[in-house]
Image (spheres, rainbow, N blue to C red):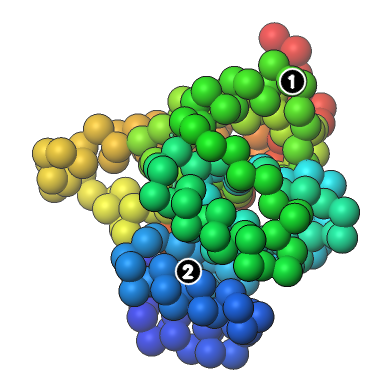
Amino acid sequence: MIIDERLSTYIDSISWDIPKYLKEVEKAALADEVPIIRRSMQSLISFLLEMKKPNAVLEIGTAVGFSSMFMSEYVPEDTIIDTIEKVPARICDAKENFAKYPQGDKIRLLEGDAADILAALVREQKQYDFIFMDAAKGQYAAFLNPIYDLLQPGGLLVTDNVLQEGDIIESRYAIRRRDRTIHGRMRGFLYEMTHSEQWDSVILPVGDGALLSYKKTNVKQM
Ligand code: SAM
């Protein structure tokens, strides 16, 4: 929790409501310890989707499908959501959830490692105007080049979990040895996104830290 827990509970209590079916999926995911977007992140994403009205959405990190079903509630009727997942058990649960979900036909599950799938989507010259990145934190920087190619100029990239439960502000030596690589990579990723000619980014202390990045339309040629 990167903001005061009582404050977070208060905000959720006044602003949060989702369809009953999604509440059940959320409850089951939390009981199974599947990490899904927190309520504050849900509020931010639904707000951004309603404002942006994207034609095509890409998600990296489906888990059991909660966030893709959630996003499908807030996009225009004919918008398709592509979502990538590599873990077979999660793919299986997500398929089951999508099959039962009234708007499941708006969601296309792309099975496999995001590195391969993103490369394939670039080869197909796919274009999205909203991308949600919620996968392995250590890979965010590596996914950036294909994401840049897949996002239309003026498109929005939303990245979750960038403040790592607050650990991002700690010195490398205060971080458990096995987490130091991810910690360093995330710091590098945040620096790159906030000092870029190609992106305009803002870091928000929402959920576990959200990075909003807008793909600039007037990039200076080097
Ligand atoms: N977005 C989901 C939600 O809120 O309902 C939660 C996603 S969970 C935080 C991250 C998911 O990304 C995990 O299910 C994990 O298996 C998947 N993942 C991590 N690295 C991946 C990769 N390289 N390719 C595909 N999926 C990946």
Q: Which residue is mark 2?
A: 38
Q: Looking at this rendering, what residue extends furthest in the top direction?
A: 222
At x 54% / y 60%, what residue is drawn? 96
Task: Examine the rendered structure and indicate whether residue 63 appears above or below residue 42.
Answer: above
Toward the viewer: 56 or 113?
113
Q: Position of residue 40 (x, y in %)?
A: 53, 72
Percent of width and height locating residue 137: 39, 41
Residue pointed to by mark 1: 124
Decide which of 173, 84 is in the foreground and name it. 84
Could you tell me which residue is drawn at 49 percent across and 26 percent down? 115
Q: Is residue 141 left or right of residue 108?
A: left
CA gap between label 1 and label 2 equals 33 Å
User: How dense is the environment of label 1, judged by Cα within 10 Å: few (below 14), some, or many (20 and up)?
Assistant: few
Q: Is residue 45 visible?
A: no
In the depicted view, which residue is nearer to us: 168 or 84?
Answer: 84
Residue type, numbered disc 1: Glu
Q: Which mark's residue is nearer the viewer, 1 or 2? A: 1
Vertical position of residue 192 compared to residue 209: above or below: above
Q: Which numbered marker is on residue 112?
A: none
Quarter containing the C terminus: top right
Point out the image quarter for the N terminus: bottom left
Identify residue type, mark 2.
Arg
Residue 125 place in picture, x, y as percent: 76, 21
Q: Taking 14 as reference, is 137 above or below it?
A: above
Secondary structure, mark 1, is loop
Q: Position of residue 104 (x, y in %)?
A: 70, 60
Mark positioned earlier in the residue sequence (1 or 2): 2
Q: What residue sits 67% from the left and 25% below the top?
A: 121
Q: Residue at x 83, y 56 (%)?
A: 53
Cβ of mark 1 under 8 A from ligand 1: no
Element type at mark 2? loop
Callout 2: 10 Å neighbours few (<14), some, many (20+)?
Answer: some
